[in-house]
Amino acid sequence: MNRLWCISFLLGTSVFAGQTIRVGSKAFTESTILGEVATQLAERSNLEAHHQAELGGSQIVWKALLRGDIDVYAEYTGTLSQELLAGKVSNSLPQIRLEIEKLGLRSTLPLGFNNTYAIGMKRTLAERLNIHTISDLKAHSMLAFGFSAEFMDRLDAFPSVKATYGLDPSNIRAMEHELAYRALASGSIDVTDLYSTDAEIPYYDLVLLNDDKHIFPEYQAFFLYRTELEQRAPEFVTKLQGLAGRINESAMIELNAAVKIKKRSEAQVAAEFLDKAAPVKQVKARADWWQIFKNDLRNHLYLVSISLSLTILLGVPLGVLCAIRPRFGEAMLMLAGVIQTIPSLALLVFMIPLVGIGSKPALIALFLYGLLPILRNTTTGLKDIPKNLLESADALGLPRFYRLWKIELPMASRSILAGIKTAAVINVGTATLGALIGAGGFGESILIGIRRDDTWMILQGAIPAAGLAVLVQMFFEGTERLLLPRGLRH
């Protein structure tokens, strides 16, 4: 009977999960807006929908779709032909559609706008230096160039510009795309990469330099989705297909401006667009700031509590083993030290091919980052116990485990708890990066705030994260007073 109940429960869970539409989006405003459009279309088809926003660059979201971590996201013809399917197709949508069908994917027809790459600068500076084309930049290589990391790396972007135009600036740096506009406005940089539908172009009075050698292909936007979605959610796919040709370039610029310039949420902007495009019954209200806070807190606590608990459960016994077996301890501490030197973002991205996006890679990365302080402090605390006390215990004939449990661990407890406190604070701070791979938490508000240039939104994530770190440290300090043997308290 119990077995039958378990099977029924698992089947019920699978059916429920199968009805949830998982929408992905890249880490820029236009992609997030289109992700919200798809999410709300699913909700208006009476389906559960979850938007995995801010997932990073094209490769991350593309691989998430192929793995089945998400069901649908908005992509561009140029990105597929030049980057994701490079060498396999031309920039022709019919060819792209034939190729992606081999991968178990389908697409809608183009939405109606071309968001191509461009290189731009402030109009006043361009006019003063008489710069009108990308070719003109070659004579001004001393200008300060600031390109997004993805633009610097993608074959259809800076490598192509460098090879075709012979552009090799001496002052060039990589930066977040959303921050480049502020850098242009402040004069920190002079030239950057742009998307042609960016709302900031008219807002900051920027000029797009003519691509006189025509290296940037068209980037017609459309939705990619997994083929099984046509059987699982046919009404949703029909509505998604119905968006073809409904968003022209000026309309997309307006949608971007509503978020970036007017500081409105992507959810509001998407809802209003859908109401105008195809009015239907209202769906549930989108989350307000209090709901967002509660959701971020729940996700952040989940990441911190699970990963830290696992780190403590494994780290302390390993630290004991490191103290008992010095050679093993040296190797283990060296390995933990190497892991600690890997940048947080890099470690998170390394985990994606192994376990996908979401909370799993974040939990593994947080677990690994917490190991070193707990291992090192446990080992050091046990090794620093005066030898005469251990010799006395041996003389009394105390069993090895009894001596460890009743004498050594209590005496090393201050050092062990100090390592746990350090790991906990590192954990809370690093968990904010989990938002980059769809794990949620307070980092999500920080990323949205950076993208929208919204200081309040950044603080909405940063202040609670800092407050949580303080509370966690206070909790472990209280725990230390309770657990520390009376004779070791000061």
Image (cartoon, helix red, strand yellow):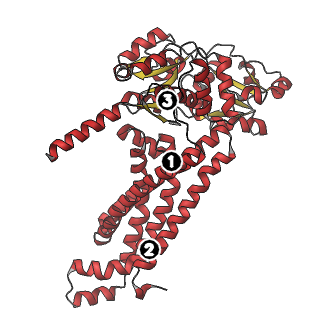
Q: Nearer the viewer, mark 1 or mark 2?
A: 1
Q: Earlier in the sequence, mark 2 or mark 3?
A: 3
Amino acid type for the residue under numbered disc 1: Asn
User: Are dots 2 and 3 in contact, CB under 8 Å?
Assistant: no
Q: Earlier in the sequence, mark 1 or mark 2?
A: 1
Q: Earlier in the sequence, mark 3 or mark 1?
A: 3
The residue indicated by pointer 3 is: 39
Q: Where the N terminus falls, by quadrant?
A: top left
The residue indicated by pointer 2 is: 479
Q: Image height check: is 133 above or below 326?
A: above
The quarter of the displayed image where residue 384 is located = bottom left
The Cα–Cα distance between marks 3 and 1, rounded to whole angstroms, is 18 Å
Q: Residues within 10 Å of mark 1 (few under 14, many from 20)?
A: some
The secondary structure type at the circle numbered 3 is helix
The secondary structure type at the circle numbered 2 is helix
Name the disc covering residue 380, or none. none
Residue 216 placement, left or right of 206: left
Name the disc covering residue 295, or none. 1
Q: Image height check: is 463 above or below 292?
A: below
Q: Residue at x 46, y 85 (%)?
A: 489
The quarter of the displayed image where residue 123 is located = top right
The Cα–Cα distance between marks 2 and 3, rounded to whole angstroms, is 44 Å
Residue 338 placement, left or right of 274: left
